[in-house]
Structures are given as structure tokens and as C-alpha cells.
Image (spheres, rainbow, N blue to C red):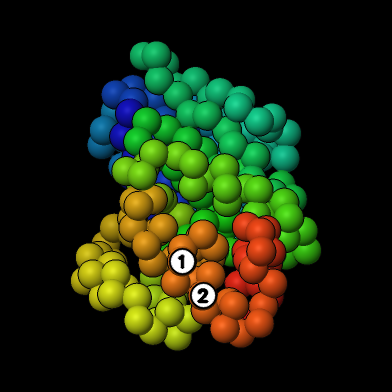
Amino acid sequence: MEIAQFKYGTDNLGYLVYTTSRGIAIDGGDPAAIIAFAQEKGIEIIGVTNTHSHGDHTPGNAGLMEQTGAVFLDCGSFTQGQGIELGEGQGLEVLLTPGHTMDSVCFKGEGFVVTGDTLFNGTVGNCFSGDLTAFYRSLKQLIQLPDDTLIYAGHDYVMESLQYARIIEPENPDIVRYKEGYNPDKIVSCLADELEVNPYLRFNAPAMILRLEEKNLPADTELQRFTSIMEIY
């Protein structure tokens, strides 16, 4: 199973996850590019879905369905662990990840996860749902994936996120290395890198705990530390 990334708008990222013959479009905001790619590869687009229902992730849905006959898979109707079959014994697993929005989901494939606006490369999404506990649990679910899992997010916010990470943890040496690996033509990182650099995932890192304690912020539990980071930074 393969994944192709398509940038649209200013910084949005959409995807086609595919086997040798069939594919699923996720947040496919550039139908023309996705369809052209699929035709070149001989791939039938059988499904169209989203990581959440915000309008900047859904503008390509209608065009993709009209031009390919693909079925719409409503992210709000998924269940935890639900499978999306692509044939050839391959498919995606749905992870329910409320927090950014309550209908946010991620799609786990072999060696990668499409995270939408739940987890970005270098940061996390805004908690528009207002439920920081749900957001924490969703991120905990993601960081328990294998360290080499590739993170494909919903936006390219990398450079801005690293600037902010440097403000939060100015002594973190891994930020420079992460920045050097940035490729604007393919926005991807591995989970191990996120755990070293992304401040919103580093609630168990000794350096982050010390920083919170120095600021007299609640830091006794994981949830307290995550909440402190989200509310202050």
C-alpha cells in the first residue's frame, strides 16, 4: 500500500492511499491532481473521506465523487478500529481522535498514519472542541504507535511550528536537525522525531517537566502537563 500527498490552497495537504488497483482519497482538496495521478497509475478511486468536517478539508469531495463515482465515507460515522478495505488484503484502520473537533479521525496504514489536524509535523491542532481531556487521550493513542510510524498531517505548518518549539524549549538540540530534514515537496516526519521536537507531545520529557515546574504550572500527571502546555503555549 502506498500514499501520495497533494498540497492545495496555501498549506493544506490531501492524500490518496492506494494499492496497485484501488485507492481512497482523504481530504482530497485538489481533485484534478488526484484524478490525474490515479489515471496515470491505473488506480480506481473507490472512496472519498476526510479526517474531520472542517471546510478546508472537504472542498474536493463533490468533484472527486462526480468524476470517479467513488463512494463518500462520512468521518462522523466511523467507529473505533473500523477497517476500510482496499483489496489485495490491504486497507486502513480508523482511529477516533476527538479533540481538534469531536468528529476528528486518523487513518492508520502499514507504517504510516494520516492525522489531519489532530497531529501536525511539529505541533498539534487547536482544541476547537474545548475538550482537552479527549485531545490528550487521542494524542496518547497516536504516540503509542511504533516510533518509525510516518506522520502525514493536514497542513504544512512545519517552519512556523519549529520557531515556536524553539521559544518553548530553546535548549532542545533536536529542533535544528528536524529543521534540516524539512522538504516542502513532501511533508512527513516519523513519530520518534515528533517525540523529540513537538512540544505538545513532550509532556513526559524531563526537560519539559522541569520547564513547567519552573513556571509553577501543574505538572504532577500527564494530563496536567499536557493541559499546562496547551493552555500556556
Residue 133 image position (x, y, % from top left) = 73, 55
Q: Can residue 35 be seen by looking at this rendering? A: no
Give the camera-side residue of 15 and 133: 133
Residue, disc 1: 206
Mark 1, residues whose alpha carbon is within 10 Å: few (<14), some, or many (≥20)?
A: few
Q: Can residue 228 be seen by looking at this rendering? A: yes
Give the camera-side residue of 19 and 138: 138
Residue 61 image position (x, y, % from top left) = 58, 46
Mark 2, residues whose alpha carbon is within 10 Å: few (<14), some, or many (≥20)?
A: few
Residue 110 to residue 199: above or below: above
Quarter of the image with the N terminus in it: top left
Q: Tell me the tag on residue 210.
A: 2
- Label 1, label 2: how far apart the Cα atoms are: 6 Å
Q: Is residue 231 left or right of residue 25?
A: right
Residue 85 to residue 147: above or below: above
Q: Are marks 1 and 2 in contact (CB under 8 Å)?
A: yes
Q: Tell me the tag on residue 30.
A: none
Residue at x 39%, y 39% (from the top left corner): 146
Quarter of the image with the C terminus in it: bottom right
Q: What's under tag 2, amino acid-wise? A: Leu
Q: What's under tag 1, amino acid-wise? A: Pro
Residue 191 image position (x, y, % from top left) = 38, 50
Give the camera-side residue of 220 and 101: 220
Residue at x 57%, y 48% (from the top left corner): 140
SS at circle 2 = helix
Q: Is residue 110 left or right of residue 124?
A: left
Residue 196 image position (x, y, % from top left) = 37, 62
Residue at x 29%, y 24% (from the top left corner): 20
SS at circle 1 = helix
Residue 52 to residue 77: above or below: below
Q: Is residue 219 left or right of residue 43?
A: right
Q: Quadrant of residue 82?
A: top right
